[in-house]
Amino acid sequence: MSFTDGVFGISPQVMALRSQRLELIAGNLANQDTPGYKARDIDFVAALQHSTAGALQRTHPRHLGAGGLSGEAGGGDVEVLYRVPTQPSMDGNTVEAQREHAEFMDNAIRYEASLNLLDSRIKSTQRAIRGE
């Protein structure tokens, strides 16, 4: 484990995924009146597990890898999924504005909380380096 891994942990991956999710939801809201547009999102927990899988190491050949039975570590892009609407519109658009607004606000609050956590880790590390 490197020094930066100890300080930042999985915060960089969390911030990147939260940012990507904000972009997807904003795109959904921007296309709420586009006929045939399919609302998109990511499964945050699965995406985080996938993005951090490469950081795990097997300590014994018979241990399962982070990718499950295949033993392969994660990597690559996050899978973007389509939302299933509770009430689809007649024009095929699956964006539900109220749901998208709620998801956007929830993700924005979590993004800010992650940013505050990362900020406090950086400040704590700076104080430790200065010997305060």
Image (cartoon, helix red, strand yellow):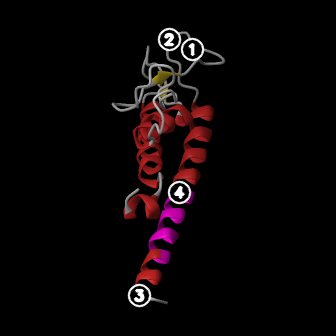
Q: Residues within 10 Å of mark 3 (few under 14, many from 20)?
A: few
User: Which residue has dot 2 on it?
Assistant: 92
Q: Which residue is mark 4?
A: 114
**Which residue, as the protein is rendered here, is positioned at the far right?**
86
Q: Label 3 near label 2: C-beta < 8 Å?
A: no
Element type where label 4 sits in the image: helix
Left or right: 71 in relation to 89: left
In 3D space, how far apart are the residues under numbered discs 4 and 3 (Cα atoms)?
Answer: 25 Å
| In this view, 5 is above or below 106 | below
Q: Is residue 124 above or below residue 131?
A: above
For the stretch drawn in magenta, what is the main secondary structure? helix
* Residue mark closest to the camera, 4 vs 3: 3
Quadrant the N terminus occupies: bottom left
Which mark is on residue 130? 3
User: Which residue appears at 58% of the width and 17% of the height?
Assistant: 84
Q: Residue at x 41, y 53 (%)?
A: 12
What's the residue at 40%, 31% (across, down)?
74
In this view of the protein, can residue 26 be seen by the observer?
Answer: no
| Residue 76 visible, this orientation | yes
Q: Earlier in the sequence, mark 2 or mark 3?
A: 2
Mark 1 or mark 4, which is nearer to you?
Answer: 4
- For label 1, the SS is loop
Badge 4, how many Cα within 10 Å: few under 14, some, many 20+? some
The crowding category of the residue bearing disc 2, from other C-alpha atoms within 10 Å (few below 14, some 14 to 19, many at least 20), is few
* Residues shaded magenta: 112-124
Does the stretch in magenta take in 64?
Answer: no
Please state which amino acid type lies under the numbered disc 2.
Answer: Gly
Whether pointer 3 and pointer 1 mark residues with C-beta atoms closer than 8 Å, the reply is no
Q: Which residue is mark 1?
A: 89
Of the residues shown, which amino acid type is indicated by label 3?
Arg
